[in-house]
Amino acid sequence: MMTKEEFMKRKREEKTFLVTAEEEGDSITPISLYRRMKGKKKFLLESSQLHQDKGRYSYLGCNPYGEVKSIGTEVERTIYGRSEKLQSNVLQVLEEVIASAQVDSPFPFCGGAVGYIGYDVIRQYENIGADLHDPLNIPEVHLLLYREFIVYDHLRQKLSFVYVCREDDSADYEEVYERLQIYKEEVLQGEEAGVTEIGSALSFTSSITEKEFCAMVETAKEHIRAGDIFQVVLSQRLQSECIGDPFALYRKLRIANPSPYMFYIDFQDYVVLGSSPESLLSVREDKVMTNPIAGTRPRGKTKREDEEIAKELLGNEKERAEHMMLVDLGRNDIGRVSEIGSVTIDKYMKVEKYSHVMHIVSEVYGTLRKRMSGFDALAYCLPAGTVSGAPKIRAMEIINELENEKRNVYAGAVGYISFSGNLDMALAIRTMVVKDEKAYVQAGAGIVYDSDPVAEYEETLNKARALLEVMK
């Protein structure tokens, strides 16, 4: 526990610092912590990779002190109940709100923004065509701002209740520790909220028919033959009734499809949940990373069949060429914000297996240039080439011509942006939006010159299957 003298000294000398209260965590789980939290706009960020570098920490919180949301350049910023509407670039507004500072913290997330930056934010940087209809009617970007949160350390089996002191904070030493004590008691001594199961035997309808999707593929192939693009990712959105608690879906999903990025964010009017295999962008101090995933096969029924499918996938020239093209696109995106000569490729073309599919995976790293921030990196990397195509801008123009609805959350990014400048944003795939007792799932397939339209349609269903099956 920090002494009062140390607290006062740090308040004088540091713009941002953390005050923590630690408890044993060996008899509780992130799921039970979430269910015990009392408050609104709750979130849970966790990972299936529970080791030193990735997935060591799960983060939870509720009752944000503010939020930033936008549609196009119409940005609404709310801080401590005071709302302001702006005509601006939403990432610039976020950077002003976060105002990153050096923070002495053992945790990569030191408080800040949690939420999503949707695919359609690209319209603030590029003219990709006319705006499309949004049947979900939710913000293109929506991030909640937290100064109080919980960290679950899976390595040490410890809980940390965290309060972020910033230079605009009037709370004194006694008030901060009283707030942390109340927070601890509410969570550790509270009862777990009940979860209403989702009804079974629900069917999904699509935004387009199989015939319409196949026609889109043929049109895309015409663009490829004409030399407009090398590849484009086309998607369909599936919709179902969803009556009950969406958290029940998340609990099923994290067991059925454990992934490096698992998230549940309750925006009050709607919920975003998912289990994404892919990092769109990670920034830790001056290190920046993106994680291209391209090349997909369904899982085998036996271990031997699994191994045979993985071998065939890695040996498939079409899949290898597509993956290498998207790795080059990732290198280009990372290179635009990195020191010259610092971009490297790690874990090149490895097969990773998930509950229903396997993918070819690579990781691209760079060292962030001076005067460049994580927000600059987001602007250059959004959306990923793995969900748009190559060349990226022309591919997005074609997507805009062929798809009949906004993508919104799908193919954007979900995760956190910390007060420290760190950020970790998953690619918004294997992601579900639940709103007004309806569930929405979207999935895409990479179209190249020799794509089979029916096979690409089936690939979108294979990718969506992990989410569809938790609705049963």
Image: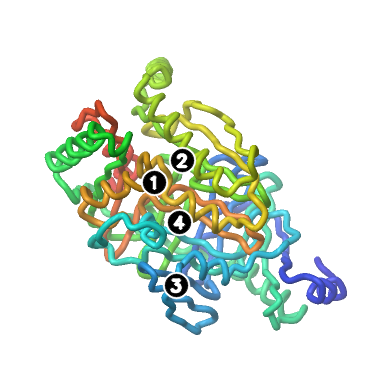
Q: CA distance from mark 3 to mark 1?
A: 27 Å
Q: Left or right: 123 with respect to 135?
A: right
Identify the residue at image location x=72%, y=65%: 20
- Dot 3 or dot 1, earlier in sequence: 3
Q: Secondary structure at mark 2?
A: loop
> Which circle marks residue 277 in the picture?
2
* Mark in the foreground, 2 or 4: 2
In-front residue for pair 237/158: 237
Residue 406 is left or right of residue 282, and the answer is: left
Residue ID at (56%, 54%): 30
Q: CA distance from mark 4 to mark 3?
A: 28 Å
User: Considering only order in the chain, which callout, 4 or 2, is on the residue closer to the N terminus?
Assistant: 4
| Residue 63 x, y percent position in the rendering | 52, 72
The residue to which callout 4 is attached is 264
Q: Is residue 153 above or below residue 217?
A: below
Find residue 371 and report its horizontal and vertical position in percent.
65, 58
Kind of residue at disc 4: Tyr
Q: Quadrant of the C terminus?
A: top left
Q: Residue furthest right?
A: 5
Residue indicated by mark 3: 88
Nearer to us of marks 4 and 3 is 3
Residue to which mark 1 is pinned: 429
